[in-house]
Amino acid sequence: MKIILIGASGTLGKAVANELGQRHDIVRVGRNSGDLHADITDSASIRALFEKVGSFDALVSAAGGVHFGALAEMGEKEFAVGLRDKLMGQVNLVLIGREFANDGASFTLTTGILSEDPIRYGASASMVNAGLEGFVRSAALELPRGMRINAVSPNVLVESPDYAPYFRGFKPVPAADAALGYARSVEGAQTGQVYRIW
């Protein structure tokens, strides 16, 4: 399979590349690194990426930023970060990517445990992750030509110690374990699923 991997240079992206790269051709994409570059907050950049890559069999997104901060100090500007980046960035990968995807292609997006298990300072992440999961379930009903869509919802990663103070009491998962969820989505047959790696 020809797989486009967005966020390939990140901790999670590297683990996904290691897992899927054993069996498939990976096009590594990052904002400033990788085989090709794209900014998922910019629809024109996303379209330019697909025009360079051409047809593909699967797209995996392991990218997207949100704002972490106290709710009392957050306004529209802070919430807009996650809405523009992690939410609409990944949604636009699907909306534009379906034009270039082969029949039966799959899309795999990234959400996270905060959609169901919120933490202090994580209101934006919880909102965005839950929104993405709703989009995945709904889009699965309407994608054309046998295309599939799923999401992977990982816990905080062992390899991301900077986030550990926010996740007291959570048991971090290795990035390699999270990567198995992406393999399940890409190489499986289900659609409209959220694979929880907690």
Image (tube, rainbow, N blue to C red):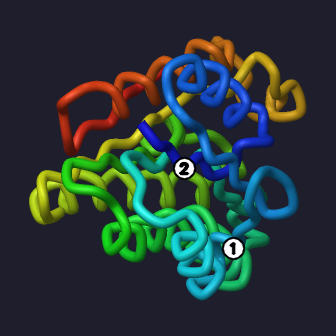
Quadrant in which the N terminus is drawn: top left
At 64% from the left and 18% from the top, the residue drawn is 170
Q: Can residue 172 be seen from the camera position used here?
A: no
Kind of element beneath mark 2: strand
- Mark 2 = which residue? 4
Residues under numbered marks 1 and 2 in contact, where contact means CB atoms less than 8 Å apart = no
Q: Nearer the viewer, residue 19 or 151?
A: 19
At 60% from the left and 61% from the top, the residue drawn is 124
**How far is the residue under mark 1 from the one under mark 2?**
24 Å
Q: Where's residue 162, x and y in %?
A: 89, 33
Few, some or many C-alpha atoms within 10 Å of disc 1 (few <14, some 14-19, many ≥20)? some
At 18% from the left and 60% from the top, the residue drawn is 138
Q: Where's residue 151, x and y in %?
A: 39, 42
User: Against 72, is 61 above or below?
Assistant: above
- Mark 1 = which residue? 81
User: Against 3, is 158 above or below?
Assistant: above
Residue type (three-letter) at the residue carrying disc 1: Val
Q: Where's residue 135, x and y in %?
A: 30, 61
Of the image marks 1 and 2, the number of the one nearer the N terminus: 2
Nearest-to-viewer mark from 1 and 2: 2
Residue type (three-letter) at the residue carrying disc 2: Ile
At 73% from the left and 30% from the top, the residue drawn is 14
Question: What is the quadrant of residue 80 in the picture?
Answer: bottom right
Q: Can residue 182 be seen from the camera position used here?
A: yes
Few, some or many C-alpha atoms within 10 Å of disc 2 (few <14, some 14-19, many ≥20)? many
